[in-house]
Image (spheres, helix red, strand yellow):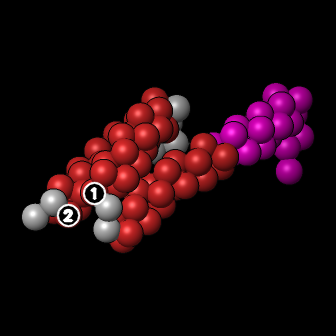
């Protein structure tokens, strides 16, 4: 347990930051799930629209430090490939 005032403050800040990051991560996952559902639904236009909404949200997660840049890029790339494959 934190004893010094500085350590106590850091613990409080960490709690708040963890809550914010948890919400951000949940929001990103929701956007990804929307794309997945649109892909499984079979409508390429809907899937493409969902992907367009998900991309900025994922990259925002990168700037906020929730996701690593390469992780977000990889997920976007794979989802894009799956949406494109629906057309064929």
Tag 2, which secondary structure? helix
User: Spatial distance from mark 2 to mark 1, Cα to Cα?
Assistant: 6 Å
Q: In this rendering, does residue 3 appear at all?
A: yes
Name the side, left or right, on which 2 lies relative to 78.
right
Count of numbered tags: 2
Evaluate if marks 2 and 1 touch, with contact meaning CB atoms under 8 Å apart.
yes
Outermost left residue? 88
Q: Looking at the image, is 69 positioned above or below residue 83?
A: above
The residue that label 1 is drawn on is 44
Q: Looking at the image, is 45 positioned above or below residue 61?
A: below
Q: Nearer the viewer, residue 72 or 50?
A: 50
Task: From the top left corner, tell me how far across and down residue 80 is, in percent.
Answer: 24, 52
State the residue at coordinates (10%, 64%): 88
Q: Main secondary structure of the magenta part?
A: helix
State the residue at coordinates (40%, 57%): 35
- The magenta region covers 1-21
State the residue at coordinates (52%, 55%): 29
Pick whichever of labels 2 and 1 is earlier in the sequence. 1
Name the side, left or right, on which 3 lies relative to 27.
right
The residue that label 2 is drawn on is 86
Q: Looking at the image, is 57 positioned above or below residue 74?
A: above
Q: In this rendering, does residue 68 appear at all?
A: no
State the residue at coordinates (32%, 61%): 43
């Amino acid at each position: 347990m934190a004893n010094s005032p500085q350590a106590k403050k850091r613990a409080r800040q960490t709690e708040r930051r963890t809550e914010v990051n948890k919400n951000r991560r949940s929001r990103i996952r929701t956007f990804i799930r929307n794309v997945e559902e649109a892909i499984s639904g079979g409508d390429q236009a809907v899937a493409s629209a969902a992907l367009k909404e998900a991309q900025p949200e994922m990259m925002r997660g990168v700037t906020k430090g929730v996701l690593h840049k390469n992780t977000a890029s990889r997920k976007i790339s794979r989802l894009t490939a799956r949406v494109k494959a629906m057309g064929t």
